[in-house]
Image: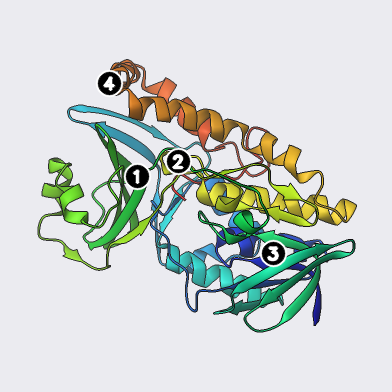
Amino acid sequence: MRRTEVLIAGAGPAGIATALSLARRGISARVIDRRPGLLDKACGEAIAPAGVRALAALGVHTQRLRAAPFQGVRYVEGALAIEGRFATGVGLGVRRTELSREMLAAAERAGIEVALGCALTGFEQSPRGVVAQTSRAEHHCRLLVGADGLASPVRERAGLALPAGSRRFGVRRHFRIAPWSALVEVHWRDGAEAYVTPVAADEVGVAILARADGRNFQQQLAAFPELAAQLAGAEVVSEACGAGPFWQRARRRVTGNIALVGDAAGYTDAVTGEGVALALQTGDALARIFAESGSPAGYEREWWRLTREHRGFAALLGFAVAHPCARRVAFRALAVAPGLFERLLRRATGDGGYGAPASRGVAALAG
């Protein structure tokens, strides 16, 4: 049996960020993931300025990423367009596999053991911690962290899962074409949105969010004729990658010596772009609480506090998805008051700098 202070199931941004945050506080962690290589996910792949700064604070060399800067966000629906720009720097569009590579490198520099291709096969709690079985070894740890994504087995096995909410799915592809905008574009149609993110000087990622399961990317792209025309002739440089259903729920984030972070802790809808943002926020909060008290008990309350604005924004955008006529009225109003949309954008993305009270200074637009 191997002994460790913290065992983290999941080597995506949530798991690695939690391990890095623990290491900064002198707590050792081992990270395992059943997947054998660089980790990917169908998402919009855009990180706002505060998120970029937070990654750098964790020791992630963001300047080494193959990425593209962006200055804000534009919403487009037919002839309507509203946009806002950041106040405190530029964001980065970066492929999730590229981000995974650099986060794994940061973990290696910090001396964190990461075992890819190693699955968590079972666990049970004891008065002194958690005994966890993996496909390679048995571990005794003080804390088990579930950072294992939307369909979290840790959440399910710990009895923390609730039935999923609305069934929406995402699908993403990359195209070899120079970005035509310095902004992330969100194209709206009834029942679907398409996110266009520059991820390199000669490449954009297109993620489509809809009720369809995403197995036919071209069919979904056809619902956005202007965008399809913009991409006509561009080389497709990645296979379609899908994710969902979204709106995963948890009864709570802590039970005994088990805690959930990132998507595993509950995910509203990708339209909020909360993925990387909450992975960094919740991972750091859990690390801080555990370092201070030796227990994850205070994390549940902190999770609710940190996610309050995200959940409110999710409810607002969820209403916009479900009520297209009201959405178009709101878009027209914001189009004649662009300053208001910009203020909303900055608040929603924590664009006040790392450590800003409204969002603990960490935000991403598409996780």
Precedes in sequence: disc 3 or disc 2: 3
Between marks 4 and 2, how big is the CA–CA gap? Answer: 20 Å
Q: Nearer the viewer, mark 1 or mark 2?
A: 2
Q: Amino acid at mark 1?
A: Val
Tell whether label 3 touches label 4 (CB within 8 Å).
Answer: no
Q: Quick check: marks 1 and 2 in contact, CB under 8 Å?
A: no
- Report how far apart the C-alphas of labels 4 and 3 lie in the structure: 43 Å
Q: Which mark is first along the chain, 1 or 3? A: 3
Quarter of the image that includes the N terminus: bottom right
Which structural element holds mark 3? helix
- The nearer-to-camera label among 4 and 1 is 4
Residue for badge 2: 269
Given the image, on which type of amino acid does mark 3 rest? Leu
Q: Which residue is mark 4?
A: 328
Judging by the rendered image, the residue that carries numbered circle 3 is 20
Locate residue 184, reporting x and y percent. Answer: 34, 44
Camera-nearest label, 3 or 1 = 3
